[in-house]
Amino acid sequence: MTSHSNFDMDEIGLEILTYLLNNQDSRDTLEGIIQWWLLERYIRQKITLVRKVLLELVSQGLIVEINNPNTQTSYQINKDKIQEIREALKGKT
């Protein structure tokens, strides 16, 4: 096993043990653990990072932030920058 695999195993083990320590009456299947324990925690951890990336893309003018007082803020591509975005993504996707 490579050190990267050991890191993944250690990290996942810590995630499972932390969840179980905080929710001592919990039990679940493999699929449930992945979906409800690990994925939910991963998503919560990434919210801050995604927010920063969105703000950076807005500041670069590549996406547009739409604020509506009746709904949550949403984001969409800046259609004036489509060609620029295509060029930037060429070979990266």
Image (cartoon, rainbow, N blue to C red):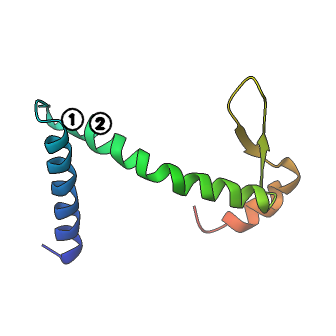
Asked if 53 appears above or below 1 in the picture, the reply is above
In x, y percent, where is residue 54? 66, 53
Rendering coords of residue 44 (x, y %): 42, 45
Say left or right for 77 vs 10.
Answer: right
Image quarter in which the C terminus is found: bottom right
Considering only vertical position in the picture, is 46 above or below 29? below
What label sits on residue 49 in the rendered view?
A: none
Q: Are marks 2 and 1 in contact (CB under 8 Å)?
A: yes
Residue labelled with disc 1: 31
In the figure, 9 relative to 4: above or below? Answer: above
Name the quadrant containing residue 34: top left
Q: How many marks can you see?
A: 2
Q: Is residue 47 left or right of residue 61?
A: left
Please state the horizontal and vertical placement of residue 87, each as a whole percent of the image.
Answer: 75, 66
Residue found at x 16% / y 69%: 6
> Could you say which is closer to the camera, residue 15 or residue 84?
15
**Image side of residue 28 versus residue 62, left or right:** left
Q: Amino acid at mark 1?
A: Glu
Q: CA distance from mark 2 to mark 1?
A: 6 Å
Per the image, label 2 sits on a secondary structure element best described as: helix
Which label belongs to residue 35?
Answer: 2
Q: Residue at x 16, y 38 (%)?
A: 30
Placement of the N terminus among the 4 image quadrants: bottom left
What kind of residue is marked 2? Gln
**Percent x, y of residue 41:** 34, 45
Q: Residue at x 11, y 35 (%)?
A: 24
34 sits to left or right of 13: right
